[in-house]
Amino acid sequence: MDVTGQHLRGEDWYGDDLGAARFTDCTFTDVDLSEASTSGATFESCTFHGGRFNASTHTATAFVGCDFRRVSFFDATLDGCKLVGSVFTECVLRPLTVLGGSWLGVTIRGTNLSRLDLAGVDLRESDLSMSDLSLTSLAGARLDRALLRETNLDRTDLRGASLDGVDLSAATLRKTHLDLAGAVLLAELHGADVDTSA
């Protein structure tokens, strides 16, 4: 299936296997993809208004430069997926199973992401401002140059995460789990001169 420039409205794709379908510049309005599955599919420059991905499973699927508005991903699985440059607005993103993948440059602002396991995910240059990442695991994640303005990092696991160019002082930290490198970065952001050779 290779679809370009179509407006799909109110489609019922519940439980469908879309395989490696390709959609380019398509608009999905209130499309039901609950329990649907994809493997190696591509959605490029697509817009999703409303609609559901509830309990759907996506393996090595790419959502590149997509715009999601008021879309539910309740209990969905994203296994090795690429969400590069996509924007999520007023979406339900938990519970969600995420197994690796690249979320480079995603925008997920003001969203509840608490208790998710995002360990090892590539979130470089992402905008997670004002989102709730309390009790979320970002262990080993790549967060270089990510925006965390007013992001809730209460008891968030950042151990092993790469944080180059991240302003942790702009986030809300409370019992946040940091490794030595993260602790040094935080101290330096607060004006400390850290001597790591001691």
Image: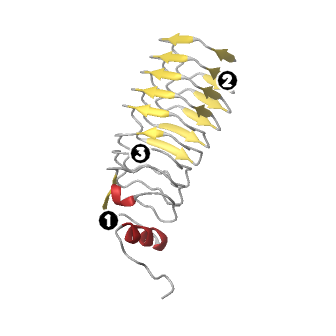
Locate residue 175, reporting x and y percent: 32, 65
Label 2 CA crowd tier, 10 Å (few <14, some 14–19, many 20+)? some
Mark 1 and mark 3 lie on one chain; the one further toward the N terminus is: 3
Residue 6 appearing in the image:
yes
Give the residue type at disc 1.
Answer: Lys
Q: Is the N terminus in the top left, top right, bottom left or bottom right quadrant?
A: top right
Residue 65 tag number: none
Q: Is residue 172 left or right of residue 126?
A: left
The correct choice, above or below, for 180 with respect to 47 in the image is below
Residue 21 tag number: 2
The correct choice, above or below, for 136 with respect to 113 in the image is below
Residue at screen point 63% across, 34% down:
61
Q: CA distance from mark 2 to mark 1?
A: 44 Å
Give the residue type at disc 3.
Answer: Leu
Nearest-to-viewer mark from 1 and 3: 3
Label 1 CA crowd tier, 10 Å (few <14, some 14–19, many 20+)? few
The correct choice, above or below, for 150 with respect to 190 in the image is above
Residue at screen point 42% across, 29% down:
72
- What residue is pinned by disc 3? 128
Secondary element type, mark 3: loop
- What residue is pinned by disc 1? 175
Q: Is residue 162 left or right of residue 23?
A: left
Mark 3 and mark 2 lie on one chain; the one further toward the N terminus is: 2
